[in-house]
Image (spheres, helix red, strand yellow):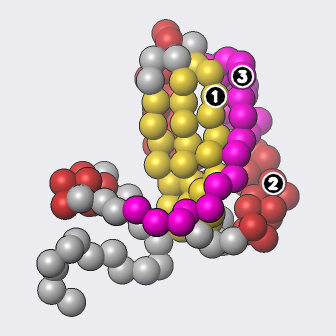
Amino acid sequence: MIIRLWVTGLFPSRAENYDKFANSRSLHMFRTLDGCEGVLFIRSETQGYVFSFWRDVDAIEALSKSDLYQQTVKEIVAAGFLSEPQTVELVNVTGGFLAHNAMQFLRSLSIDLGAQEIRLVGEPR
């Protein structure tokens, strides 16, 4: 699994508009793209972070060619809440864990964690 990390500057007075866009327009886009296994939107007052989880590099390469992605990028740029700088980094997931409270929190957000069923440690199969 590969994480695509997109980081952007945000205008503080427009950060809530960014949240609304991310959780409606961007979320819809990510859910429809083949190979996207999930996405998290995280922000501070001046920075936005999008952690998207991908099956493989081919799926990430298809992202930039997607008409839906290109349209979403045009819309987010036109909305006027992004500021410089913006960066993208691809990193491999090599391990880790999510504690019970983190999994419960993600479930409460109705986050699609991908095709694999995720269980909490100690949960029955």
Kindly identify the amino acid type of the residue bearing the numbered disc 1: Thr
- The spot of residue 90 in percent (x, y) is 69, 53
Q: Residue at x 62, y 62 (%)?
A: 92
Q: CA distance from mark 1 to mark 2?
A: 17 Å
In the current view of this chain or complex, which residue is farthest to the top?
13
* Residue at x-position 53% and y-position 66%: 94
Q: Whole-percent x and y of residue 9? A: 62, 21
Q: Residues within 10 Å of mark 3 (few under 14, many from 20)?
A: few
As drawn, the label of residue 64 is 2
Real-space Cα distance between discs 3 and 2? 19 Å
Q: Quadrant of the C terminus?
A: bottom left
Q: Is residue 64 magenta?
A: no
Q: Which mark is residue 68?
A: none
Q: Do the residues bearing badges 1 and 2 touch, measured as CB atoms within 8 Å? A: no
The answer to whether residue 79 is magenta is: yes
Answer above or below: position of 33 versus 82: below
- Residue hosting label 1: 8
| Numbered disc in front, either 3 or 2 | 3
